[in-house]
Image (cartoon, rainbow, N blue to C red):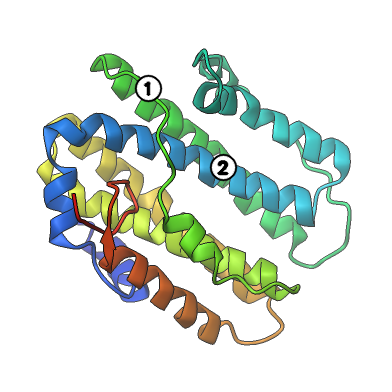
Amino acid sequence: MNYAPLLEPIHQFLHCRTPQAWIDEARKPENLTLLLTDHMVCELKAAQTAVWLIRKYVADKPSGDAILAWLKPYEDFIFGEDHDSNFINAHKNLTKSIIVRNELPWADDLVEKMVLLIKEELHHFYQVWEIMQARGLPYRKITASRYAKGLLREVTTHEPDTLVDKLICGAYIEARSCERFASLAPYLDEQLEKFYISLLRSEARHYQDYLTLAAQISPKDIAPRVRAIGEAEGRLISEPDIELRFHSGVPTL
């Protein structure tokens, strides 16, 4: 299948492509466990971000508490000591209607887009874990990359600009994930290549959803903020990085 039409707007959106030096390091067999582990953690973090947006800006407290509970089995696995895979059943039961506590014109759209994103990201989490299990790859805790923190340093500290900037950051994270999946896939074994290609469509839609919400919510043109945050994202990807992670920069290992 030709994915060029899907990737073209993402390549135009991002300020740089993944450096070949990152691909060369990431494709090494000895880095597979690290890469899959970080991928799994990134899926949870994406879901956490979407839950946070719903709870902070639109949901009533009972709905917010219920949707927060979606994450608990996954968080217990990643951050706990026992790494109990209780999420195996949890990922099949993500159903809850969200009660919107306000009449903001974009509230229903935010809920709809973020609930779908949460379900997809947690399903991807489960898929990565299945691959690791099948290959006998153990899960061990790893440190977070500098990427997300670096992006969040660009976020404005007053509303509604804070929300708009966070949505733009979300768009860049999802777009970079899509671009990176496509960049790395041809260098992997057949199973992993098919898996990463299968993720492209949802990641591309997530980035578009984030951008659409940002434009809908902002009282002014978001283009300057998109450009500024994009420039910061490009620096994080193209500058030297001492750690290899799914969204890390040029390896200096």
| Residue 135 coordinates in the image, percent (x, y) | 23, 17
Q: Residue at label 2?
A: 47
| Residue 22 coordinates in the image, percent (x, y) | 19, 54
User: Which residue lies at the image location 14% right of the left edge and 57% below the top edge?
Assistant: 21
| Residue 190 coordinates in the image, percent (x, y) | 13, 33
The first of marks 2 and 1 along the sequence is 2
| Residue 23 coordinates in the image, percent (x, y) | 16, 52
User: Which residue lies at the image location 79% right of the left edge and 68% below the top edge?
Assistant: 105
Q: Is residue 220 above or below residue 205?
A: below
Tell me the mark number nearer the camera, choosing from 2 and 1.
1
User: Which residue lies at the image location 74% right of the left edge and 56% below the top edge?
Assistant: 108
User: Which residue lies at the image location 54% right of the left edge and 72% below the top edge?
Assistant: 154
Answer with left or right where residue 86 lies relative to residue 197. right
- What amino acid is labelled 2 in the image? Ala
- What amino acid is labelled 1 in the image? Tyr
Identify which residue, 100 or 140, lies in the foreground: 140
Q: CA distance from mark 2 to mark 1?
A: 19 Å
- The answer to whether the residues at label 2 and label 1 have Cβ atoms under 8 Å apart is no
Tell me the quarter of the picture where residue 34 sits. Answer: top left
Q: Residues within 10 Å of mark 1 (few under 14, many from 20)?
A: some
Give the secondary structure at mark 2.
Answer: helix
Q: Residue at label 1?
A: 139
Identify which residue, 9 or 168, lies in the foreground: 168
